Image: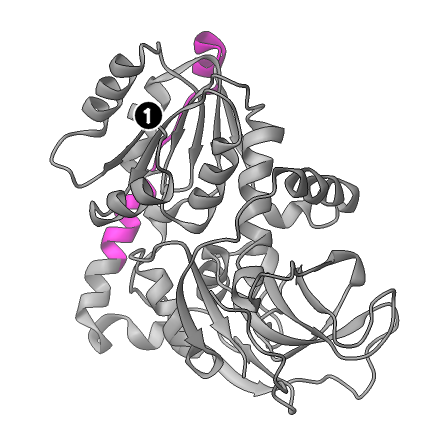
Amino acid sequence: MAVTELVPAATTPQAWAVPRMGSLANLVKQPTNLVAQSAPGTVRVAVRAIGLNFADVFCVLGLYAAFGTSGNPVPGLEFAGVIEADGEGWKKGQRVYGTTRFGAYTTHLDADPRYLRPIPEAWSFEQAAAYPVQTITAFYALHHLGVLQPGATVLLQSAAGGVGLQALRILAATPDVKVLGIVGNPKKIDLLTKMFPGQKRWRFVSREAGTTLSEQIKSFLTAQQSSGFDLILDSVMGPAFKPSYDALNPCGRYVIFGSASLAPSTISLSPMTVGFYNPMNVVRMITLAYKFLTRPKIDPLVLVADNKNIMGYNLIWLYDKLQLLTDMYSDLNKLNLEPPHVGHVFDFDDLPKALAYFQTGQTVGKVVVTVP
């Protein structure tokens, strides 16, 4: 992908805000309240690309507690752009990417300079915006929670997603790991096989392949002569949880960092689009309620008896762990990973459409929005 040219960004700061939670249709593009000079201790960034994440969907639907509901909050966790003025150790014109505790759905941002990083010369703005959230998520889950070791047997749900692809790149840098990657669409298997050639101890399978996940797991473990998985990364949950947990080795670690099976694919939670306004929405609401009520549950005493570990992980709570984030960026730099795979690009004016497409779960790699 070619590096985006340093063309002038939008001059009137605008952002996509959520004045009322419950539906993607409630996203509103409006002027921001940025003043001429950046706030003290911050640096003004002209945003050129925004990375989308599942957390954004939950924010708009009002299902993300850390986001808040007062005022007109602006979603978005990651961005890439250009420094607009010298300050806080940065120079005007420098290309940077970074993270923010919400607020990235905007054309201009007063960013905390501690959370900015220079964009590698060969990377585009789109690739840079796709990097921080997924890569930090994957690295923290694999190394800090999962304590990944050479020779480990790993199960990875949603292997073709943004986090999944970055996790695979990190796993590829670990000697002798055996990986079973699960995808939701069999068409994604060919892509993964081409992206990671020569991995003879890796296998990619689809949840729609006509066999149960238990059968696929058993076949993989038998072929690898493994007793079970040492590490499982799960962003899906739902029916996949039990067969995965059952295949976890004693002392194994099950890391949960999402629940895509509970994320509505097209549903609106806004009262104005429920009931007689949209009968199909009622069906979807009932389905979602059923999934929630039948979601996986486990007795803590079973964990003791099985000697297994289950860990939950939400990246937003790492935001204040600045030294940890700095250390992880340093460790990742040593891996010299390729730039992230950007599978889908939308214009800033089409951000709601981008988020709706992302919500379907049919994407491969990262969905990115570009700012003119």
Considering every residue shown, the one lying at the far left of the view is 210
Q: Toward the viewer: 45 or 330?
A: 330
Residue 16 image position (x, y, % from top left) = 53, 78
* Picture residue at 24% right of the left edge, 54% below the top: 286
Q: Is residue 10 left or right of residue 159?
A: right
Residue 309 image position (x, y, % from top left) = 51, 20
Residue 349 image position (x, y, % from top left) = 46, 83
Q: Which residue is mark 1?
A: 200
Q: Quadrant of residue 131?
A: bottom right
* Picture residue at 50% right of the left edge, 68% below the top: 2
Residue 30 is a magenta residue = no
Q: Toward the viewer: 93 or 305?
A: 93
* Circle 1: element type: loop
Q: Quadrant of residue 142?
A: top right
The amino acid at mark 1 is Lys
> Principal SS element in the magenta part?
helix
Residue 184 image position (x, y, % from top left) = 26, 45
Q: Quadrant of residue 119?
A: bottom right
* Picture residue at 53% right of the left edge, 18% below the top: 150
Q: Toward the viewer: 144 or 63?
A: 144
Where 91 sits versus 118, above or below? Answer: below
Decide if residue 309 is in sight here: yes
Where 164 sits versus 142, above or below? Answer: below
Where 110 sits versus 228, above or below? Answer: below
Range drawn in magenta: 285-307
Decide if residue 294 is in sight here: no
